[in-house]
Amino acid sequence: MASCGEVDHSVSSLPSSKKGSGGGGGGSGSGTESSCSDSNGSSPALSVPECAICLQSCVHPVQLPCHHVFCFLCVKGASWQSKRCALCRQEVPDDFLERPTLLSPEELKASAGGRSGATSDHAWYYEGRNGWWQYDERTSRELEDAFSKGKKTAEMLIAGFLYVADLENMVQYRRNEHGRRRKMKRDVIDIPKKGVAGLRLDADAVAGALSSAGRENSADGADTTTAGA
């Protein structure tokens, strides 16, 4: 059972129509639901699959080895409870979050460059080690909407955790852990950045991240360690 401010990612929490029929490995057979895309099916670039965890259209969809597709941040959030696919329960490799299989790498670059349908020339960022990460598009839209309406705070559901964005002091923190804060900012879309929502734009930097003792904190859901890339 998830604690306050968290979402239960276990397979038992999914609607019956979303659960895979298999209990072990594979997952590419009858356990694949229509809400998930298969690598042998229609081109994922033509249609955005639905994520069986958040039940919304996938944001930066990634494909697990079992061929099930979820939002990258949904997979990351679920990994804190179980290193298994939320549908078929096949194990997820330990390094998958650092080396995810993106359905559309071009879409990630377009998002970082403001070429993916964004209506503003500004974007929202959270601080990382030696640089800034851009929020995913869905979260950026929510922050921009709150900012344009003059709100002082906004709540964000990221990787299964509820965060509060303090738009006056430009910091964010988990709703039930006020002591851990991270700087955030609104800036132009084309500033230098590490990546989007924990997905690195520079593939060569992944090797360095794998040698790090911990994970990047905050808006990609990794607040359980203090070290980051």
Image (spheres, rainbow, N blue to C red):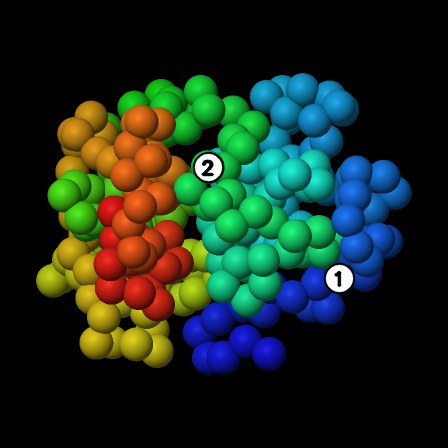
Mark 2 and 1 residues: CB-CB less than 8 Å, in contact? no
Quick one: SS at disc 2?
A: loop
* Disc on res. 15: 1
Q: Residue at x 48, y 71 (%)?
A: 6
Residue 181 in sight in this render: yes
Quadrant containing the N terminus in the rendered view: bottom right
Quick one: SS at disc 1?
A: loop
Give the residue type at disc 2. Answer: Arg
Q: Residue at x 52, y 31 (%)?
A: 102
Image location of residue 106, percent across then percent down: 44, 20
* Disc on res. 53: none
> Disc 2 vs disc 1: which is toward the camera?
2
* Above or below, 159 relative to 8: above
Which residue in the structure is indicated by mark 2? 99
Q: In this view of the protein, which residue sits in the foreground, 34 or 143?
A: 34
* Above or below, 215 relative to 7: above
Q: Quadrant of residue 146?
A: bottom left
Judged left or right of residue 158, residue 56 is right
Judged left or right of residue 196, residue 66 is right
Q: Quadrant of residue 117?
A: top left
Image location of residue 34, percent across then percent down: 78, 39
